[in-house]
Amino acid sequence: MAQDTRERLLDQAESLFAERGFYGVSIAAIANELGLTKQALLHHFGSKEKLYGEVLKRISEQFAALEQDRSTEDANSVEKLVSYMLELLAPAIPNRDATRVLMRELLDNKRRADTASTWYLKSFLERLIALVKAIPGWQSARDAEALALVYQWLGAINYYNISEPTLTGIFGASAYRDLDAVFGRQLEKLIRASLIRD
């Protein structure tokens, strides 16, 4: 399969998984959106589970690439971590579907979790734990403490990224633009404050 065709298939699948979740979209619906038969899509990926796994793998690789870009900077460990977390919020990731899929994978995954054999986001979470534990005062922290912190930040980022339609409906487009202008600064304050250990 040509790389551009594969990327197009993964883009469409990611968009549908972001919108409806793993259980809310069928392989037939994905094939239909792409103008393919179900059999043609299965020929390329084998099953819905494998297609979903490829979507998660690609998202994990996008997040890893962002982190790798930060690792070449001369900034200290706090600045690298803050910069990386803000990058996850920013639209530098090709679209917000990636963070929506991430949120669904972390929160809306009970049935699939019982049978999953590969956790594509594990390395992403482990890298975030390592970034926290590289910060002075956090080196002796337990992994659970660092993960709790990271999970709170990811929750804020992901919740915000999926809330635009609702917040725009409640407060209006102008108020949402105002919120969008300040959310990153508030998130940065939250991250920095939560890195202060007693």
Image (cartoon, grey):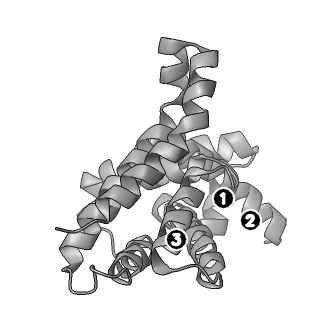
Residue tagged by mark 2? 6
How far apart are labels 1 and 2 at the CA level? Answer: 6 Å
- Disc 3, SS: helix
Q: Earlier in the sequence, mark 3 or mark 1?
A: 1
Whether residue 99 is situated above or below residue 83 in the rendered picture: above
How many numbered discs sit on the rendered protein?
3
Report the mark closest to the observer, 3 or 2. 3
Q: Residues within 10 Å of mark 1 (few under 14, many from 20)?
A: some
Residue tagged by mark 1? 10
Q: Residue at x 37, y 80 (%)?
A: 135
Callout 2, which amino acid?
Answer: Arg
| Left-right relation of 116 to 66 | left
- Disc 1, SS: helix
Q: Residue at x 16, y 68 (%)?
A: 198
* Circle on res. 159: none
Callout 3, which amino acid?
Answer: Glu
Name the residue nearer the viewer: 55 or 80: 80
What percent of the width, then of the height, locates residue 19? 52, 38
Proximity of marks 1 and 2: CB atoms separated by less than 8 Å? yes
Q: Residue at x 54, y 66 (%)?
A: 84
* Circle on res. 79: 3
What percent of the width, then of the height, locates residue 3? 80, 71
